[in-house]
Image (cartoon, rainbow, N blue to C red):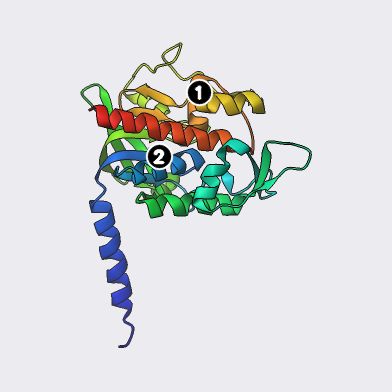
């Protein structure tokens, strides 16, 4: 049978449309496909939750891809090696630094993406968040547009996705929580009720606080990874990713509890 160009186009349009239509209402909508969100997405999907990850860029993975200053290796601690082993990502101990390991950053990023999708999470790339859906005193979804539309400043109306829980995994800018505090004028579960802002580099403190600061900051609205650190005023930690992965595990546990208590 001769290959028809229309067959290719129709197959892509129909399959993508079906995927999007089936995820207009989800259990968990995640914004940003970085390591904490992808970790949380994999765990939640394995638990039978309907999870969609919306990533503005063409390639999910967040800051993992570039390693440290484009040296494409990163560091992780021993206490996340079981997770790396589970998703099939290799690691190598650091000489003269017990408890630390190097990981190829491309392998880690692709492993996190692949394992989340294979667990049942769906990733929509090149999608940006313009706003949140806000109903009855809680965050209830996302207002979405194409990433290039947003970047070019085109006047194109968005579409909406509803969700029982929303996770801000956008990293340093904590974009979703910024939107919610600015537009819905909500008070967050922080000492000031607002975003405290990320502090400078302190790797040890940043690794710990990334996990500690992963929480529900407003009904229906969670933050993980560097988004959580920015909201609660934690330090940054650079190209070490154990805390980010553990943050994703904690986020998955908190979201599971929230979903099952409603």
- The quarter in which the C terminus is drawn is top left
Q: Position of residue 62 (x, y in %)?
A: 52, 44
User: Looking at this rendering, what residue extends furthest in the right direction?
Assistant: 96
What residue do we see at 39% from left, 55% from top?
118
Q: Secondary structure at mark 2?
A: strand
- The quarter in which the N terminus is drawn is bottom left
Residue assigned mark 2? 31
Mark 2 or mark 1: whose residue is earlier in sequence? 2
User: Looking at this rendering, what residue extends furthest in the left direction?
Assistant: 136
Residue 25 in sight: yes
Q: Position of residue 6 (x, y in %)?
A: 29, 76
| Residue nearest the viewer, comparing 11 with 104 | 104
Q: Secondary structure at mark 1?
A: helix
The mark lying in front, picked from 2 and 1, is 1
Q: Is residue 17 above or below residue 215?
A: below
What residue do we see at 69% from left, 44% from top?
69
Residue 62 in sight: no
Q: Is residue 153 above or below residue 168?
A: below
| Residue nearest the viewer, comparing 173 with 255 | 255
Q: Position of residue 20 (x, y in %)?
A: 28, 53
Task: Measure the alpha-carbon separation of dots 2 and 1.
Answer: 20 Å
Neighbor class of circle 2 (other Cα within 10 Å; few <14, some 14-19, many 20+) is many
Quadrant assignment, res 132: top left
Q: Position of residue 154 (x, y in %)?
A: 37, 47
Neighbor class of circle 1 (other Cα within 10 Å; few <14, some 14-19, many 20+) is some
Quadrant assignment, res 43: top left
Q: Is residue 168 above or below residue 50?
A: above
User: Does 204 sit left or right of 16 as displayed?
Assistant: right
Residue assigned mark 1? 212
What residue do we see at 56% from left, 22% from top?
234
């Amino acid at each position: 049978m001769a290959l028809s160009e229309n067959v290719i186009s129709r197959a892509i349009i129909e399959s993508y449309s079906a995927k999007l239509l089936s995820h207009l209402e989800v259990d968990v909508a995640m914004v940003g496909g970085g390591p904490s969100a992808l970790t949380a997405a994999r765990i939640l999907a394995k638990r039978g939750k309907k999870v969609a990850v919306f990533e503005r860029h063409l390639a999910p993975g967040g800051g993992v891809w570039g390693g440290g200053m484009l040296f494409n290796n990163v560091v992780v601690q021993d206490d996340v090696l079981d997770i790396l082993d589970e998703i099939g990502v290799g690691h190598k101990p650091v000489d003269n630094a017990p408890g630390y390991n190097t990981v190829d950053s491309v392998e880690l990023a692709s492993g996190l993406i692949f394992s989340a999708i294979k667990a049942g999470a769906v990733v929509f790339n090149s999608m940006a968040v313009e706003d949140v859906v806000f109903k009855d005193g809680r965050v209830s979804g996302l207002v979405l547009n194409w990433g290039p539309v947003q970047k070019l400043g085109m006047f194109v109306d968005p579409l909406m996705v509803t969700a029982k829980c929303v996770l801000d995994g956008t990293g340093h800018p904590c974009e979703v929580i910024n939107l919610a505090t600015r537009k819905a004028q909500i008070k967050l579960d922080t000492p000031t009720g607002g975003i405290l802002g990320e502090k400078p580099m302190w790797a040890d403190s940043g690794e710990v606080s990334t996990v500690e600061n992963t929480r529900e900051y407003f009904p229906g609205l969670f933050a993980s990874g560097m988004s959580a650190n920015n909201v609660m005023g934690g330090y940054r930690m650079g190209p070490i990713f154990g805390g980010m992965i553990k943050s994703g595990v904690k986020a998955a546990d908190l979201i599971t509890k929230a979903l099952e208590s409603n």
